Amino acid sequence: MSEDRPRRRRSVLARVFGFLLVLFVLGGLAAGGAAYWAWERFNAPGPLKEDTFVMIEPGDGLNAIASKLRETGVISRDDPFNLGVLDDATIFKLGTRYLEQQGKLKHGEYKVPAQSSMKQVMELLVSGKVIQYSVTVPEGRTSQMVLRILNADTVLTGDLRAAPAEGTLLPETYLFTRGTTRADILRRMERDHAALAEKLWANRKADLPYKTLEEAIILASIVEKETGVASERPQVASVFVNRLRKGMKLQSDPTIIYGLTGGEPLGRGIRKSELEKATPYNTYIIDGLPPTPICNPGRASLEAVINPPDTDYLFFVADGTGGHAFAATLEEHNENVRKWREIEAQRAKDAEAAGGTP
């Protein structure tokens, strides 16, 4: 009897150990199977049926990002085993941590393609390829007009109330991401203008008839408003440069309009009384340049004024093609004006005939 008891105890212990070993092996196999299944799900096509936009805010951590992806349907809301531990949000977090990418996810607005896997979504957020928007400010707009353009954009945020000084903004197409403020764009326009103007001025042509960058910007704004043909800007600039050198009045119609409306469209021709009306901007009356720019000139007009070509032009008038005819003498100019008057008269006749046609 005494020998049977130790044998029975050893047998019981062996069975218990074997049972625990089986449980351990089965648990390991189950854990391995769960890990394999989670990895396959991490790489499998996602539930999105169409492209979806997702906004990751600054400061969003991995938990917040996973929740946002679940809320927007980028990853599944379902928990396949109803265990509360292996839903897709958890798998996204585990996969991202396993690949050591959790600290590389970037904020911004993303366009997630349909059926993107969790791994592909993670890679998109790591890439930082956020959606880019753009706002275009054309050349020759006043600062008040620029404010209206920025305030009308539906993606930019924040209101702009006070317009910056005329001639301090660079007209361009500006790219931005969602969350950018209108003030941010305005600061970029001011910064880009200052950088470009100073760079051009540092390499200016010698013996210009203006001594400061501010004066060059004033003249560039006049050139900008005088022609919409980019190739003509150097010639237009040369006319005004030559006039300043000779002490001639600039006689620029856009300066009259700015003195009357602050740069808003006049909506009609300039009256004789307005040509003779004294304002600080009427270059038919004042000598030299007006006191401020009359718009925000673009790159081409700034370049044309700071490095104008050498010409003997003193006059220009519309030529009927959208451009201008340039002349060095008053006689040549008067002939160009005569041709332009004939074109105007013919157009008036054509318009009248068209209006009378049934």
Image (tube, rainbow, N blue to C red):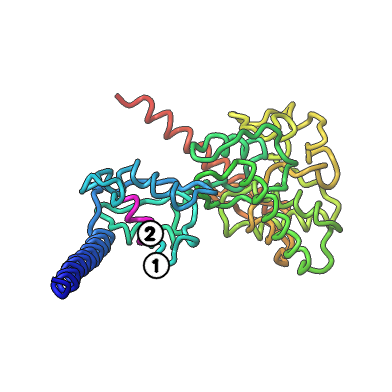
Residue 139 belongs to the span the image colors magenta: no
- Between marks 2 and 1 in the image, the one whose residue lies nearer the viewer: 1
Q: Is 6 or 169 nearer to us in this picture? A: 6
Q: Amino acid at mark 2?
A: Met
Q: Secondary structure at mark 1?
A: loop
- Picture layout, residue 2 above or below residue 69: below
Q: Is residue 300 left or right of residue 244?
A: left
- Residue 130: x and y in percent read 45, 54
Please report the bounds of the magenta region as a residue range: 88-96
Residue at the image point whose x is 80% and y is 52% from the top: 214
The crowd level at tag 2 (other Cα within 10 Å; few <14, some 14-19, many 20+) is many
Q: Which picture quadrant has residue 353? A: top left
140, 73: nearer the viewer: 73
Q: CA distance from mark 2 to mark 1?
A: 10 Å
Residue type at numbered disc 1: Leu
273 left or right of 288?
Answer: left
Return the x and y of residue 246 as percentages of the image width and height.
84, 56
Q: Residue furthest front?
A: 1
Mark sitting on residue 122: 2
Q: Are marks 2 and 1 in contact (CB under 8 Å)?
A: yes
Q: Is residue 91 rendered magenta in the image?
A: yes
Residue depicted at x 76% and y 48%: 218
Are there few (<14), some (14-19), or many (20+) residues within 10 Å of tag 1? few
The secondary structure that most of the magenta stretch takes on is: helix
The label on residue 38 is none
Residue at image x 78%, y 37%?
282
Please give left or right for residue 287 compared with residue 93 in the image. Answer: right
Q: What is the number of the mark on residue 99?
A: 1
Q: Answer above or below: position of 355 versus 307.
A: above
